[in-house]
Amino acid sequence: METILIVDDEKNYLVVLSAFLSGEGYETLTADSAQQALEVVETTDLDLVLTDMKMPTMDGIELLERIKEKVPDLPVVMMTAYGTVEKAVGAMQLGAFNFIQKPFQNETLKQIVDKAVRTYRVLKENRRLVRALENLYRFDNIIGKSEPMQAVFHIIQRVAHTKATVLITGESGTGKELIAKAIHFNSPRRNKSLVAVSCAALTETLLESELFGHEKGAFTGATTMKKGRFEMAHEGTLFLDEIGEVPVSLQVKLLRVLEEMSFERVGGTKPIAVDVRLIAATNKDLKAEVEHNRFRKELYFRLNVVGIKLPPLRERSEDIPLLTVHFVNKYAREANREEMTISPETMRFLCNHRWPGNVREFEHAIERAVLFSKGNEITLDDLPKDLVSFADLEIPIDWQRLSNLPETLDAIEKRLIQKALSLSNNVQSRAAHLLGIPRNNLHYRLKKHNLL
């Protein structure tokens, strides 16, 4: 239950407001002076201060300033009589959440109070998540409290101090390179190089030269000797991303290097010994690739000494609030924005979305939302419009009862509208935005499907 402090030198107002807000489900405290109010602020965990503007000795403006010194984020709503509206606007500039002019309707007061309390609740939750990130649910720059991610952290901790080869698997965008970095920088090799190669970005000839280097004159264009990535990673770690794209012919040489830890540069004859810890990653099913003779079985076994499978984001949705806070704070700092929060309906949407591009897609969506948000609270309107897709929505349809196309389309349309309303917490303007239709159009369709 949220606690509201009501401050007014007119005791009748204290009684009336306390009774009204208590009836709305709030716990209320009262103070008949600003000095008494400050004592309560110092000793009580409050969620809102509702104070009169004009009071003897210390007025509402000075009280606001004193509160902001003690609890900067605590929302303060000013009550003002006719003729002091200009002062109320000045109070907003000093950090007041809002103001309301006496006499006021109970419903107007309720709306302002509800919004202030809700905003502060979201802010406190964001702060709590930040503390959780700092203390519990992260391993280097990898974030997750879910069981699958905690299992990943456990493997990293066990394997980091060894020389064992690690194979990281998972869909694109799940953070395989971050895992490789976490292993390296928590290993005894942390002060040596971490060298990364994208095996899908190069042709077979170029990849061989990139991995093992080449001698001068080894091929057309080889005008100088070049060291390969294996040499550059000596006493450090070599990360081979998209290992499943290595041509079969080159896999043989790669296997030999892993077994012997020596090789010759392209065009060379002198063996070069190296001490390299190898980490490989792929979004392919290497077992299936082995069965179809597209990946050598011996190399697969040599790589898969320790396997780490990263779950897609849709299978660890409980991590999304943590990731949201992390990325919002990151990009708010980079854009020199003030501290930002996430509206409850936006957080609900983020947690329910399937994220086919995983953490990479999620991060880019949050970055854009931070950059284009008009205020300090990110709403559904700030998310990329093409983010919302109903393509993977399960639409239960009784095909035996549907006899024609119009009836089928109506059933699908109704289901989509219901889903949009659910995602937007039944806020019609939000639902219309998700569906990409005008609000009056949505209203018509709600009546059509008896959803009003």
Image (cartoon, helix red, strand yellow):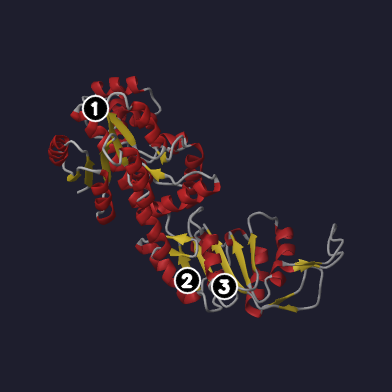
57 vs 151: above or below? above
Residue 102's label in the rendered image is 1
Give residue 96's quadrant in the image.
Answer: top left
Q: Is residue 194 left or right of residue 314?
A: right
Q: Position of residue 238 (x, y in %)?
A: 63, 69
Residue 413 seen:
yes
Q: Position of residue 23 (x, y in %)?
A: 12, 39
Q: Which residue is mark 2?
A: 156
State the residue at coordinates (23%, 43%): 33
431 vs 37: above or below? above
Real-space Cα distance between discs 1 and 2?
61 Å
State the residue at coordinates (30%, 28%): 428
Q: Amino acid at mark 1?
A: Lys
Q: Which residue is mark 3?
A: 298
Badge 2 element: helix
Real-space Cα distance between discs 3 and 2?
24 Å
Give residue 208's quadrant in the image.
Answer: bottom right
Please name which of the two marks, 1 or 2, marks the residue nearer to the observer: 1
Q: Amino acid at mark 3?
A: Glu
